[in-house]
Amino acid sequence: MRETSSDWLSDVAATTKHRGRASATGYFSVAATTGDYGISTATGDGSVAVVTGIRGLVGCGPYGCICLSWWNEAEQRSEMRCAQVGCGDGSDGKLKANVQYRLNGDGQFVEDSRFVADRKRG
């Protein structure tokens, strides 16, 4: 069993409103929002970002996990999708770190071009 110390504590952020924003930093950090059109970003290795409302955006650091809700038109219901983020650049076949993702109409993760453009500028 690993000893718990302040070195292992992480940041946690959550919001519960329409178009809410949550951001957390540090190893194993967690950011979550429940409203539609929410944005959650968690940086640091092993972090998690979640938006349970539809049409959200998420991003996290290397070796993390992202989760988004989307409306499945064929089934007429809201569904969750989760994906692993890999080493960072996508070379391991997993999603890229520190990139914002959304779900397309088929429930597949795609990079959100608004955030990709901002990242390339700076």
Image (tube, rainbow, N blue to C red):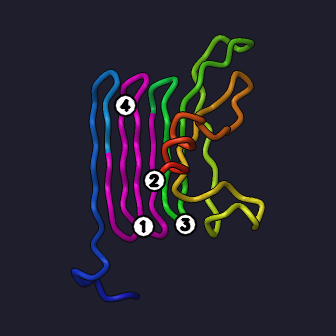
Tell me if residue 46 is in the magenta stretch: yes
4 or 3: mark nearer the eye = 3
Residue 88 locus on image (x, y percent)? 61, 65
Residue 50 locus on image (x, y percent)? 45, 43
3 or 2: mark nearer the eye = 2
* Mark before the other along the chain sequence, 4 or 3: 4
The secondary structure type at the circle numbered 3 is loop
Q: Please give the label number shown on residue 55.
A: none
Q: Please give the label number shown on residue 122.
A: 2
* Separation (CA) of disc 1 from disc 4: 22 Å
Q: Please give the label number shown on residue 62.
A: 3
Q: How many marks?
A: 4
* Mark before the other along the chain sequence, 3 or 1: 1
2 or 1: mark nearer the eye = 2
* Separation (CA) of disc 3 from disc 1: 7 Å
The secondary structure type at the circle numbered 2 is loop
Tag 4: amino acid: Thr
Residue 35 locus on image (x, y percent)? 36, 25
Tag 1: amino acid: Gly
For the residues bearing labels 2 and 1, Cβ distance under 8 angstroms: no
Tag 3: amino acid: Pro
The residue shown at (27%, 36%) is 15
Residue 114 locus on image (x, y percent)? 53, 34
Q: Is residue 103 left or right of residue 16?
A: right
Placement of the N terminus among the 4 image quadrants: bottom left
The secondary structure type at the circle numbered 4 is loop
- Quick one: label 4, few (<14), some, or many (20+) residues within 10 Å? many
Q: Establish if 52 lies above or below 48.
A: above
- Magenta residues, as a range? 23-51
* Mark before the other along the chain sequence, 2 or 4: 4
- Quick one: label 1, few (<14), some, or many (20+) residues within 10 Å? many
Task: Provide the residue designation for mark 4.
Answer: 34
